[in-house]
Image (cartoon, helix red, strand yellow):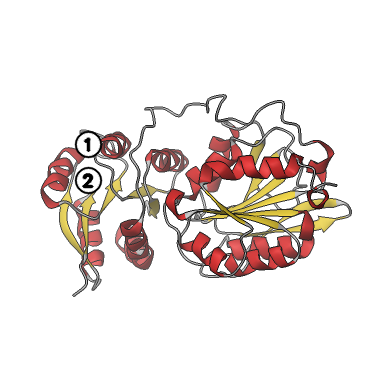
Amino acid sequence: MTKKIRVVVVDDSALVRSLLAEIINRQADMECVGTANDPLIAREMIRELNPDVITLDIEMPKMDGIEFLGRLMRLRPMPVLMISTLTERGADITMRALELGAVDFVAKPRIGVVDGINDLASQIVDKVRVASQAHVRRSVAPATTAVPSQAAAAPRNQAIGRISTEKLICIGASTGGTEAIKEILVRMPADSPGIVITQHMPPGFTTSFAARLNGLCQISVKEAANGDRILPGHAYIAPGGKQFRIDKSGANYVCVVEDGELVNRHKPSVEVLFKSAARVVGRNAFGIMLTGMGNDGAKAMKEMRDCGSYNYVQDEASCVVFGMPREAILHGAADEVLPLLSIAPALLTKLSGSNDRYRV
């Protein structure tokens, strides 16, 4: 018999603990082995029960979820699924939790908790399954977000030049992607080509994600808006809950944001963005597939390559979840498979190199 995924639920609400435990215990492949109403109890429970995954509320008594997460990921790294409220402050704190090493999050409803959490049941158990397979690393992050060191940031004298007005960099990611995207963007110089990004994320969180990146990078980062002209030195992130693609208006690339159907169960979908890149950008595109569960974007990334793009795929060792990169490789979409921290340097070398295929 397959070993069940053992889950500990940490939440200060008795109702939420009960609902989450019931949802988990309904699954044939998982069980809730314990619940705790504050992090101090949770700490002892984790030591005693050795769970595979914990779900963690953000706002709790005695010690908030972020402080507890920071300590946990330094001392005993393990897969954590955050349960966060859908507010502006909640979105900011959730981004911090992902920085500290949480695998993913679920947006908890503020009202109608019973119906809201039951509506999220399939999402919760899917994310618990993904978290149980995640490669979790010990966190060394300080208590507050720091600006990347000069060594980590892009060299200021590495000029891309006129090439940046024609080329376009397209990034797709899911589970573990917020931190992976950051590691790419902080290494991009101010005159890099325009960058378009689809990260699987629900409504209400991508604004905070973009703002956080904008404060760390030499390039400007924003949530994409319909009709935005895609400029060099700028990155555009697909809004949560919308489909995002690119088109051309005259000589300019532009963002198209629309309320389309789910594609590969996702909105935004990497498939939608990459398919538009194949059609609109062709040989002037660079594709990057980062960590994530599933196969979203793999077929379209192969279409990009068939149309002349050059594609980078994150390697298994540096992924939180290797699903999307693996599928891209299996579809023949990868030109290079690299560790996360090697992708931006390789891309910059390609952009500034002498190969005519990658020059304007």
Q: Give percent across and percent down for residue 166.
A: 82, 48
Question: From the viewer's perspective, is residue 351 above or below residue 286?
Answer: above
Q: Which residue is at the far left?
A: 48
Q: CA distance from mark 2 to mark 1?
A: 7 Å
Question: At label 2, which amino acid type do we have?
Answer: Asp
- Residue 75 shows in the view: yes
Rendered residue at 57%/31% (across/down): 215
Q: Residue at x 32, y 64 (%)?
A: 125
- Residues 294 and 212: in front is 294
**Where is residue 115 shown, x and y percent of the image?**
33, 64
Q: Locate residue 214: give its quadrant.
A: top right
Residue that appears at 28% across and 47% down: 78
Amino acid found under the numbered disc labelled 1: Pro
The numbered disc on residue 33 is: none
**Identity of the residue furthest to the right in this view:** 250
Quarter placement of the N terminus: bottom left
**SS for callout 1:** loop
Element at label 2 = loop
**Between 191 and 43, the one nearer to me in the picture:** 191
Image side of residue 348 versus residue 165, left or right: left
| Residue 165 location (% of width, % of height) | 81, 43
- Pick the front one: 321 or 88: 321
Earlier along the polypeptide chain: callout 2 or callout 1?
A: 2
Identify residue for label 1. Answer: 61
In the displayed structure, would residue 272 be above or below residue 315? below
Residue at 36% x, 55% y is 134
Residue 302, relative to residue 311: is it above or below?
Answer: below
Badge 1, how many Cα within 10 Å: few under 14, some, many 20+? few
Is residue 281 something one can see in this rendering? Answer: no
Judging by the rendered image, the residue that carries numbered circle 2 is: 12
Q: Are marks 2 and 1 in contact (CB under 8 Å)?
A: yes
